[in-house]
Image (cartoon, rainbow, N blue to C red):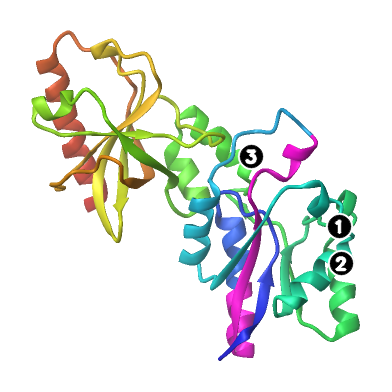
Amino acid sequence: MNHEKRIFALGFFDGVHLGHQALLDECVRLARAMDVQTAAITFESHPQSLFRSDVPPLLTTLHDRFRLLLRYGIDHVYPFPVSQKVMSTPWEDFLEELMEFGAVGFVCGDDFRFGSRGEGNAEKLRQFCRERKLPCVIVPEQNLDGVRISSSYIRKQIGEGDMATAVRFLGHGHMLTGTVVTGRRLGRSLGFPTANIELPQGVIVPRHGVYACRAYVGEKSYMAVCNVGNRPTVQGHQVRTETWLLDFDGDLYGQSVTLEFMYFLRPEQRFESLDALKKAVLCDAENTRKFFEK
């Protein structure tokens, strides 16, 4: 394999959903046929954030986008800053820059725009490649159940708590990575030590409630029960993610934990006593195990 030549997938890839995965599959297929590596571009923040103050929350941080792109077969990820210099680069200059990184072919969606004022598009990319005798694949719009697969549609499902639909359109769980911070250790006193995870800024937080999750700590993964909300039973006020990693025994304080939200178990609720809370959480754990055993 030539490790210096690469097929580039072009996009933002927020959420790395099924539509993106169709594009990445084409990138991997073409790279294997040419015996070269795969690469993808992305942006460090929302591309519209330079021009608008009301950009929607992202589905994934840059860290989680990296993780997912690698999961789906990309060898190299090139994150571009959303700066005046980058966003004002003429579209041809942008592609020429990628060729300096070893690009020998390109894949993009049929609605992808790039370069200054979004003047670059799929047809101009096709023309650029034709003139240089480079392979170019334009991937059409992807649909599921008659609905266009898009980050905005998935964002709406997550915000409403329809995690099952979001997961179907994503092709994986909704991913959030945060750092474990010190809490009040109430869970430990009840028999199930929980990790209070500080959520990243600018990323959509699921509807308040309890979820079945997959939690990643380093290279290991665990089933987990995750509560998103204000913890009303113990008079908490700050929105937080409190997670019980089933079958985990150790100290997580200060560590990075990635949560993959898979299924909405129940709404957040207030219990009359800590004993009632304990019974509910144990039931949540049982339902989480059943979900992953399907």
Please state which amino acid type lies under the numbered disc 3: Ser
Residue 131 located left or right of residue 138: right
* In this view, the mark in front (3 or 2): 2
Residue density around tag 1, few if under 14, some if 14–19, many if 20 or more, within 10 Å: some
Please state which amino acid type lies under the numbered disc 1: Thr
Read off the residue under disc 2.
Answer: 93
Please state which amino acid type lies under the numbered disc 2: Asp
Q: Secondary structure at mark 1?
A: loop
| The magenta stretch spans residue 218 | no
Mark carried by residue 47 = none
Residue density around tag 3, few if under 14, some if 14–19, many if 20 or more, within 10 Å: few
Rendered view: 185 above or below 37: above
Mark positioned earlier in the residue sequence (3 or 2): 2
Q: Position of residue 147 (x, y in %)?
A: 63, 45
Read off the residue under disc 1.
Answer: 89
Residue 161's quadrant in the figure?
Answer: top left
